[in-house]
């Protein structure tokens, strides 16, 4: 029997490890396209992010792509900020507690979904990439 007194929800550092492992399992050609995108784990989205998206509860946003997606970029665009994907630890953990998926599956799903925004991929494309990342 597992001694649950010794277990805690993964902290930021552990979550970053989970996110990196999920990213590493994505198809190589997909990872090659995303090499300049930074992945960052935060506890929650900021109030400014929530307000800009019209979201009331910070638990309603699991991840966010921040930057100009490739479908709207121009060679004349000068970006002062790096392209980033935010994974929000507490909302993801809350979602995990309510679903049957593993934490790794959920992180992979959010990561693929946010990267998909960057590339303007369809839901079917994202589903294929996510399926390819499963052990």
Image: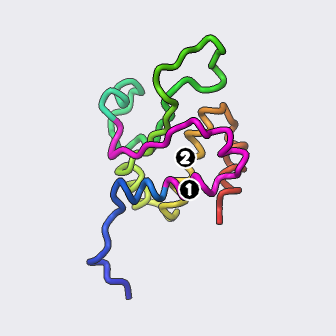
- Total numbered circles: 2
Q: Which residues are magenta?
A: 19-45
Crowding at label 2, few (<14), some or many (≥20) Cα neighbours within 10 Å?
many
Helix, strand or loop for disc 2: helix
Quarter location, residue 117 = top right
Dot 1, how many residues are within 10 Å of its Cα: few (below 14), some (14-19), or many (20+)? Answer: many
* Residue 123 is one of the magenta-drawn residues: no
- Please give the name of the residue rendered at 45% of the width and 40% of the height, measured from the top-left corner: 86
Q: Quadrant of the N terminus?
A: bottom left
**On the rendered structure, is 45 left or right of 122?**
left
Q: Which residue is mark 2?
A: 111
Identify residue for label 1: 22
N-terminal of the pair, mark 1 or mark 2, is: 1
Q: Mark 1–mark 2 contact, CB under 8 Å?
A: yes
Percent coordinates x, y for residue 42 in the rendering? 36, 44
Q: Measured from the top left, where is residue 127 in percent x and y?
A: 68, 49
The extreme bottom residue here reads 1
The span from disc 1 to disc 2 (Cα, nearest Å) is 8 Å
Q: Where on the picture, by quarter, is residue 74?
A: top right
Residue visible at 43% across and 53% down?
16
Q: Quadrant of residue 119?
A: top right
Q: Secondary structure at mark 1?
A: helix
Along the horizontal axis of the image, is 94 left or right of 106?
A: left
């Amino acid at each position: 029997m597992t001694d649950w007194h010794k277990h805690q929800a993964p902290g930021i550092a552990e979550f970053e490890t989970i996110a990196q492992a999920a990213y590493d399992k994505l198809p190589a050609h997909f990872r090659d396209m995303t090499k300049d995108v930074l992945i960052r784990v935060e506890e929650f989205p900021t109030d400014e992010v929530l307000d800009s998206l019209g979201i009331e509860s910070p638990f309603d946003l699991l991840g966010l792509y921040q930057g100009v997606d490739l479908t709207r970029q121009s060679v004349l665009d000068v970006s002062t900020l790096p392209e980033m994907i935010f994974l929000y630890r507490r909302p993801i953990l809350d979602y995990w507690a309510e679903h049957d998926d593993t934490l790794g599956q959920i992180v992979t799903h959010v990561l693929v979904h946010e990267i998909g925004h960057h590339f303007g991929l369809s839901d079917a494309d994202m589903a294929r990439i996510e399926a390819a990342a499963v052990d």
